Structures are given as C-alpha cells and as structure tokens.
Image: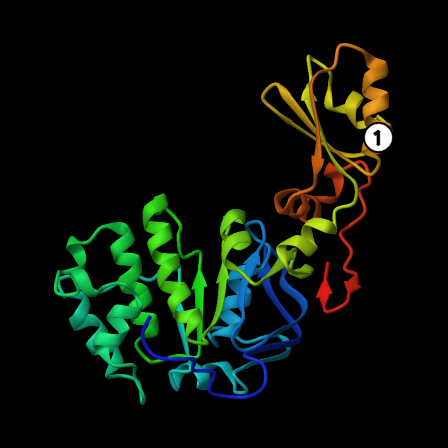
Amino acid sequence: MTGTAQIRGIGPAVVFTGVHKGYGRAGKTVRAVDGIDLVVERGETVALLGRNGAGKSTTISLLLGLDTPDSGTVRLLGQDPERAVRAGLAGAMLQDGRPIPRVTARELVRFVAALHPRPLPVQETLALAGVTAYADRRIDKLSGGQTQRVRFAVALAGDPELIVLDEPTSALDVEARRALWDSVGRFAERGGTVLFSTHQLEEADRYADRIVVLDRGRIVADGSSEAIGRSVSGGLVSLDHAGRSAAELGSLPGVVRVEMRGGRAHLRSDDPDATVVALAALGAVRNLGVGRATLEDAFLSLTAPPDTTPDAAAPTVTRTGQETV
C-alpha cells in the first residue's frame, strides 16, 4: 500500500435526495429511478445490487453527471456531479469503456493524469492499481484481468476521493477478480470511497461494508449483508422433491416461496418447524435440510416479481437502527 489515509473533506461522499429519472419507450415512461434517497459516507465501500433493469446503471450515470434527474438532487462530494468529476474528485470504471490500444499502460496513465489538476504521481498510481509489473507493455497485449487493472489505474489517475465501478469483474476469471479486488482494497485502505455495482452476490458480501438493493428503480434494502439476510424471516427447508410439484409444496404451512433446482426443492418458510411437520406427514421425504436465510435468499425475496411468490406483496422497506432492511 502506498500513501496514507486521504479523507480530504467533510460531509457525505454521495447524496441522492428524492431522485426520479424516466425514459420514454413505446409511448410509455419507464421509471429507471423512482424516488431514490441515498447517502454514502466518505470512506465507505458500498455495493449496488439489483436485477437487470433495476436502475443500477442509471443511478451511476446520475451520480457521475452523465445524465440529469427529472426531479430531485444529486450531490457528489458536496458539489454538482459534473463539476466534481471534472475536478478529478471522482474516478470511474464503466462497463463500456476500453483503453486506447497500441500504447503502454504507463503512457496511458501519464496521459490521463495530465488532464487533471492534482493527479496522483504516475508511479504511485501504477503501484496502487497493481500494474507496475507490466506497465511498459502495450495494452492490447495484456490479458483481460490485466486490462481491467489498467482501466482501474486510469480511474485513479486524477487522485480521486471516490471510485465508481460498474460491474468491474464481469467476464473475469477467479484469479483476475481477486487481483482486481486487492487493488480496490488498497484504494479503500487509503481512505477512499468505493461504490460498485455487481451481479456477484459473493463479491458484495465479501468486499462491501454496506449493500444497497435496487428493484424497479427503488431502494428495497440498505444495510450490511447480515442485516439484509435477517430481513428474510424464517428459514430455508430443502429436500429431494421426488416428483412433487411446486404448487403442492407451496401450499404447505409456512411456505412463502418455492424454488425447484434439478431434483431439489428449496422452500422459504416463515415457520420451518410447521413446514417440516407437514412434509413428514406427506411421507417419503429424503435428504431433508433446514437452514438460515442467506444474502442470496434475501435478494431473491426482495426483487422477485410480484406474481412469483405466494405472498405476492411488493417488497417493503423498514428501518432498524441505522440500517434499512
């Protein structure tokens, strides 16, 4: 790790207040962001989770000043987002960005650093991103994981206080993912704020201090992985379904969700004891298991379409202490 803690300002890093953003499609307005209120404190590492179309990319675009809200306000490090980005206070690694080919990593980082008013020294940037070993190789000769770390170095070049990562490990193998997260961790250890979107629940669970779950443009959960997992009441009952239908299992006492995977049935139950007793009454129950709900279970419950669960109510948001679940 290079450098020391660098929380350079006061107040939150990110503030969304009553933000709405819609897009017209086939004569209808789709609410990509539908009344988001969100605060990210300086020094936090926050994961945005949500299914495709949940509003993650639009939220990131609004945060970086790439789009403007229809209503509400967005503040980035106390400033208008576009101004904060121009000042080098925030860096980003977006899904659709590609480094310039036929130049070395060092040349690219040096070029980008020169565009910022107070850049991080190039050698420090390369070290922080884990790129030093191949800094003088052409980018178009690097592996996918190495290229991602070069993109991360570019995001660091302006010496930002906040880094935004949109699906940063998409299509990377396990080793490349771990290397990239090691680099992100070094930035966070210096006091940097990290906001990342991902479809990888394991990444959110392992690397984020806090998880924000988006669904249909709204925040439906906000808290630690443990708190969000606790938001799903009851537990999980699994068994070999032996030809029993989802409808039959879904009618058992306590069952609020049924998922059939291969030869196994996975039941989320508000009353696992009652569910197990009812299963025993059916007879010939094999490989029965009972466990606690996980982050994945909570995510599926919070973001399921309203007509896929027996208790078809839309997800609700309740507050417990400083966490929202």
Please name the residue shown 18% across and 61% down the image. 133
Question: Helix, strand or loop at disc 1?
Answer: helix
Q: Nearest the camera: 205 or 244?
A: 205
Residue 3 in the image: x percent, y percent?
Answer: 34, 79
Residue picked out by circle 1 = 273
Q: Quarter of the image for the N terminus: give it.
A: bottom left
Query: With respect to residue 25, does 156 lie above or below?
Result: below
Please name the residue shown 52% across and 83% down the image. 77
Residue 300 image-quadrant placement:
top right
Query: With respect to residue 61, does 172 lie above or below?
Result: above
Residue 208 in the image: x percent, y percent?
Answer: 53, 60
Q: Is residue 204 left or right of residue 287?
A: left
Q: Is residue 293 left or right of residue 176?
A: right
Asked if residue 96 can be seen in this view, the reply is no
Please name the residue shown 22% across and 77% down the image. 122
Residue 225 in the image: x percent, y percent?
Answer: 62, 54
- Total labels: the figure holds 1
Query: With respect to residue 270, does 120 lie above or below?
Result: below
Q: Residues within 10 Å of mark 1 (few under 14, many from 20)?
A: some
Amino acid on which disc 1 is placed:
Asp
In the current view of this chain or complex, which residue is farthest to the top? 284
Q: Is residue 151 left or right of residue 31?
A: left
Q: Nearest the camera: 189 or 278?
A: 189
Please name the residue shown 39% across and 84% down the image. 86
Residue 307 in the image: x percent, y percent?
Answer: 75, 39
Q: Quarter of the image for the C terminus: give it.
A: bottom right
Asked if residue 195 can be seen in this view, the reply is yes
